[in-house]
Image: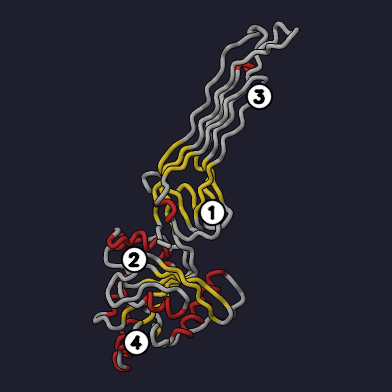
Amino acid sequence: MKFLDEAKVFIKSGHGGDGCVAFRREKNIPFGGPNGGNGGRGGDVVVECVDGLNTLIDFRYQQHFKAKRGIHGMGSQRDGPKGATMIIKVPVGTQILDEENENIIADFTEVGQSQVVARGGDGGFGNAHFKTSTNQAPRRFDPGWPGEEMWMWLRLKLIADAGLVGLPNAGKSTFLAAVSRAKPKIADYPFTTLHPNLGVVGVDEEEFVIADIPGLIEGAHDGAGLGTRFLGHVERCGVLLHLVDGTAEDVAKSYSVIRGELESYGGGLMDKTEVVALNKCDALTNEDIAIKLAILRKSSCAEVVKLSGIAGLGVEKMLRSMNAVIHDERGDNEVEERTVFEP
C-alpha cells in the first residue's frame, strides 16, 4: 500500500428540499385548505476517525464528496426526509485544515471521534406553514436553503511512541528493520526512505511503536526536502531517538544540524525527551568510537549510546531504555526505575 500523508478534497453538503404547495381535495370538504409539507434538511458531511487505516491514499482517487439533498415536501402535510449523510473515513492522527492549509478545523487522535465539517441546508416551508386567519389559502412556499461547500486539506501525522530522526543515511531504516518486523527500503545512499514507516517493537513482554521518517537536511523547517511534512510525523511522539552516523567526518555538526531544524520547526519538538546514539559503530575502531563519543557528548551535553543496528550492538539496552522513557512520558508507574544510558 502506498503512503500518502496529505490530500486536498472538496466537500459539499446537501441542499434543503423545497416546500410544497398543495390543497386538500376531498369529497364534502369544499374548503379543505392548504396541506403542503416542508422540505427535508440536506445531508451533512461528517469526517469520522476509524481503525484499520494508516494512510490517505484513498483520497488520491476520490477528491469530491457530496451529501444528498433533502427531499421536497409533499401533499397531505408530508415533510420530505432528510438527505443522506456523507461520511468520510480517515485514519488516527488526521488533521483537517482550511483551504489555505493554515487553520486547523479538527484533529483526530482517537478511533471513534467524528465532526460535522459541512451542515446541510434547511428545508423550505410548505404552504401549510403560512396559513393564517386572514390568509386561508396561501400559495407561498420556501425553497430549500443551499448547503455548504469548500475545499479542505487532510494532513496525517503518525501517532507513535518514539520517533527516529537524523540526517539522510544515518541508519534509521536499518535500525527499524533490526528491532521490528517493518521492512523499509535500505540502501547505501541518502534519501532511500521517501515516506514514513511504522514498526512495532517488542521488549520485555511489552510493545511500543517507532516512527521512522525520511532523513532531514538543513532547511527542513522551511520545507527543504519536504521537511515540514516529515517533521510533523514526530510531533506526537513521546521520545526522539537521534541517530548520528558514526562514519561521518564531523559528528558534532551532524548533531547540531538536526537540533537546529527541530528548534526552527517548533511544535514542541525541542521539549521532547531526546536519546542520542552514535550509530554504525560496527564500522569504527574502538579508538574512533571513543573519540567520537566524547565529541558527541560535548555537543549534546548528554550521555550518548554506541549503537549498531546491523551488528546488534547496544540495541537491546537501547530498547529497554526507550521503553522506560515512554512509560515516564505516559505517567505510568509500572516502570519504577528508569534505565540509565551507558555507552
Q: Quadrant of the N terminus?
A: bottom left
Give the camera-side residue of 304 and 114: 114
Residue 53, percent across and down?
Answer: 50, 59
- How far apart in space, not on screen, are marks 3 and 2 (Cα)? 57 Å
Q: Which residue is mark 2?
A: 194
Does residue 64 appear to the left or right of 337 in the view shown? left
In the image, 87 versus 323, the foreground residue is 87
Q: Position of residue 325 (x, y in %)?
A: 51, 75
Q: Disc 4 marks which amino acid? A: Cys
Three-letter residue code for mark 3: Arg
What whole-number distance in Å separates the C-alpha atoms at marks 3 and 4?
A: 78 Å
Image position of 11 with respect to 197: above or below = above
Crowd around label 1: few <14 · some 14–19 · many ≥20 (10 Å): many
Q: Residue furthest bottom?
A: 286
> Residue shown at 46%/53% (left/top)?
95
Identify residue type, mark 1.
Cys
Numbered disc in front, either 3 or 2: 3
- For residue 28, what is the image quadrant? top right
Q: Which callout, 4 or 1, points to the residue nearer the camera?
A: 1
Q: Nearer the viewer, mark 1 or mark 3?
A: 3
Residue at 71% in and 11% down = 26
Answer with mark 1 or mark 2, whichever residue precedes in sequence.
1
**SS assignment at label 1:** strand
Instruction: Mark 3 and mark 2 in contact? Answer it, CB < 8 Å.
Output: no
Q: Disc 1, disc 2: CB below 8 Å?
A: no
Q: Which residue is mark 1?
A: 49
Residue 78: give its label.
Answer: 3
Would you say the residues marked 4 and 2 are in contact, meaning their CB atoms lie under 8 Å apart?
A: no
For marks 3 and 4 on the same chain, the one whose residue lies earlier in the sequence = 3
Q: Which residue is mark 4?
A: 281
The residue shown at (54%, 33%) is: 42
Q: How many marks?
A: 4
